[in-house]
Amino acid sequence: MQIHKYMRGITLMELMIVVVIVGIMAAIAYPNYRDFAARAQRNEAKAILLEIAQNQERYYLQNNDYGTLTELGYGANTITTDTGSYQVTINPPPDASNFTAVATYQRGGAEAGKCQTFTVDGRGAQTSQPKTDCWTTAR
């Protein structure tokens, strides 16, 4: 009976059980984390496009014309989102009645096949490629 009094530590079996549990939790958590990070990057691209559309409307009210990113107050005619995942440009308008702002995904991997580009124009049309529901779905 006194032997149990002096036993300390954990057994190899207990350690292996903990390792298996941590491995299972990591196998579930990591893909969910990657999906969450990808959604955050897409939301960042959508937010900057909506900001540009709002600034374009302000610019149009003052100048009766749509402007470039430089004219809207951005540093250059091509900007990158904070995470560096999307590059945003404004396609030159054919006339003063419309603009098209495009956010293009810059990294590879599985995300590139989901929501490669987001587009918003002066008429409020929001499109995405190759999936057409990237503006509306959370995934």
Image (tube, grey):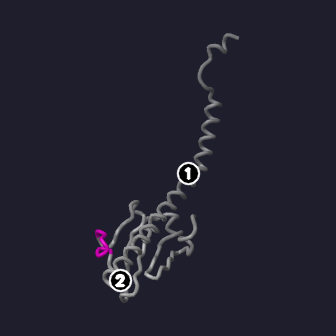
Viewer-nearest residue: 75 or 2: 75
Q: Is residue 118 magenta?
A: no
Numbered disc 1: secondary structure: helix
Q: Main secondary structure of the magenta part?
A: loop
Q: Residue at x 41, y 80 (%)?
A: 100
- Mark 2 lies on residue: 92
Q: Residues within 10 Å of mark 1 (few under 14, many from 20)?
A: few
Q: Position of residue 55 (x, y in %)?
A: 37, 74
The quarter of the rendered structure image containing the C terminus is: bottom right
User: Measuring 63% from the left and 26% from the top, which residue is drawn there?
Assistant: 11
The magenta region covers 69-75
Residue 36 position (above or below residue 12):
below
What residue is rendered at 45% in x and 77% in y?
A: 120
In this view, the residue farthest toward the right is 1
Question: In the image shown, does 80 or 6 lie closer to the viewer?
Answer: 80
Q: Residues within 10 Å of mark 2 (few under 14, many from 20)?
A: some
Q: Residue extending furthest top?
A: 2
Q: Calculate the distance from the C-alpha at mark 1 to the C-alpha at mark 2.
A: 41 Å
Quadrant for the N terminus, please: top right
- In the rendered image, residue 19, in percent from the top left (x then y), is placed at 60, 38
Left or right of 34? Residue 122 is left
For mark 1, what is the residue? 30
**Residue nearer the viewer, 17 or 123:** 123
Does residue 74 appear left or right of residue 86 in this picture?
left
Q: Amino acid at mark 1?
A: Tyr
Mark 1 or mark 2: which comes first in sequence?
1
Q: Residue at x 34, y 69 (%)?
A: 79
Image spot of residue 131 (x, y percent): 55, 73
Amino acid type, residue under disc 2 in the picture: Pro
Q: Nearer the viewer, mark 1 or mark 2?
A: 2
